[in-house]
Amino acid sequence: ILPVFERAFGPYPFPQLTFVENRFQGASGQAHPGCMTIQSERVTPEQEASLMNQLLTHELAHQWWSSGLPKWVAESGAVYANYHFLEQSEGRERAKWLLDETLYDPYIQSNSAMTPLVSEYENKRSIYARGGYLLVMLETLLGKDKLLQTLRNYYERHSQSSMADEDEMNRDLEQTLQQAVGEEWRGFVSDWMHSTKRFDPAIVSLRQKQLD
């Protein structure tokens, strides 16, 4: 996992990496600088696939996408990093299936409670699902290499900015993504960050023609 993330986002940022199994922990996993704690119930042979493909990968991604960034950026970045790793290890179709298995149903079912990504109210399903899907869609639009370089540039600008203004970091990411996608898709980025609109294709007209 570590080499995949280093190629994507740059060198591992701490001098050591420690894994701790914690049977008193409520959350499945938590990330701290240079350290990850995993709930004991998740460290079993039956949980191995989930541990390696999702939980451990997501928490390791927080060594880059961390609490020094806006909460939604940190979680969305970790979701996308997990997806990127699965693309490399399992293939794109399998990665999409695992992403949807984790995020799609909760995302659809909670649409009425969704909040914008940039919001004073924190909705976990928004920051994980809506934010994660935004970056996966942008990968489809831009290509993997361009999106990774865009995210890496943003990360490098803000990786040491624990005291930076959160509004400033949100604006910078919005402008960075808009510049990457170009004029035609600027509104898409803004809508996805500042509203609860969804990309939801529908049939708006139908034309029928009889063939001879």
Image (tube, rainbow, N blue to C red):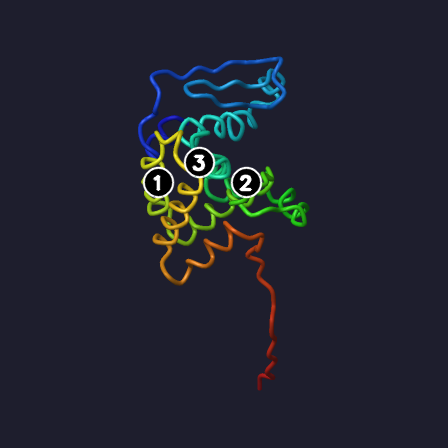
Q: Position of residue 141 (x, y in %)?
A: 41, 54
Q: Quadrant of the C terminus?
A: bottom right
Q: Of circles 3 and 1, which is in front? A: 1
Determine which of the numbered discs, if any, sits on residue 154 in the image: 1
Cα separation between marks 2 and 1: 18 Å
Amino acid type, label 3? Ala
Residue 200: percent from left, percent from top: 58, 58
Q: Earlier in the sequence, mark 2 or mark 3?
A: 3
Crowd around label 3: few <14 · some 14–19 · many ≥20 (10 Å): many
Say which element carries label 1.
helix
Q: Earlier in the sequence, mark 2 or mark 1?
A: 2
Q: Does the residue at mark 3 contact the one at mark 1 (Cβ under 8 Å)?
A: no
Q: Which residue is mark 2?
A: 127
- Quarter of the image for residue 129 reads top right
198 over 106 or under it: above or below: below
| Residue drawn 37% across the image and 50% down it | 175
Q: CA distance from mark 2 to mark 3?
A: 14 Å
User: Residue 207: x percent and y percent?
Assistant: 59, 79
Q: Which residue is mark 3?
A: 81
Q: Residues within 10 Å of mark 2 (few under 14, many from 20)?
A: many
Residues at circles 2 and 3 in contact by the CB criterion of under 8 Å? no
**Whole-Å distance between the Cαs marked 3 and 1?**
14 Å
Label 1: few (<14), some or many (≥20) within 10 Å?
some
Residue at the spot 58% in from the left edge and 83% down from the top edge: 211
